[in-house]
Image (tube, rainbow, N blue to C red):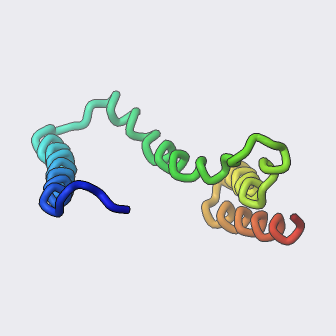
Amino acid sequence: MATSYGPLSIWAVIVAGGLATFAIRLSFIHLFGRVDEVPPWLERALVYVPAAVLAALVAPDFAPASATVEAALTPELLGGAAAIAAAWRTEDVLWTVAAGMAGLHLARFLL
């Protein structure tokens, strides 16, 4: 894809984005290096970050591209449902992954 921007402009944007990302990360390292203890309200909020990030990464793969019932019954959705059921029942990561993969492959075979 062609662009009207020159190489210097593109590199300037890349470097600026990298510096901004570095500054954000450094600010948290600097902040938590100076703060003796994390406030309890922040600790309570940080407990939910891994689950929220995982859901944000995984959920779009289960959303169908079209709104028909046939499109909603994909092997990925059925494998995800098997993984969710295993996670809820066993609370074990290994069983969750195994059930999800088994459900995915079984759904691909049957559908």
Asked if residue 88 is positioned above or below residue 106 in the image, the reply reads: above
Horizontal side of residue 73 vs 9, given as left or right: right
Q: Position of residue 24 (x, y in %)?
A: 19, 45
Q: Position of residue 50 (x, y in %)?
A: 45, 48
Quadrant placement of the C terminus: bottom right
How many numbered discs? 0
Horizontal side of residue 84 vs 46, given as left or right: right
Quadrant placement of the N terminus: bottom left
Image quadrant assignment for residue 45: top left
Residue placed most toward the observer, 2 or 108: 2
State whether residue 106 appears in this view: yes
Residue at screen point 12% across, 60% down: 8
Residue at screen point 57% across, 52% down: 58
Horizontal side of residue 55 vs 77, given as left or right: left
Residue at screen point 67% across, 60% down: 96
Seen as rendered, the residue at the extreme right is 110
Residue at screen point 17% across, 59% down: 6
State whether residue 22 appears in this view: no
Horizontal side of residue 110 vs 8, given as left or right: right
Q: Position of residue 75 (x, y in %)?
A: 77, 60
Residue placed most toward the observer, 36 or 81: 81
Asked if residue 79 is positioned above or below residue 109 in the image, the reply reads: above
Residue placed most toward the observer, 111 or 6: 6
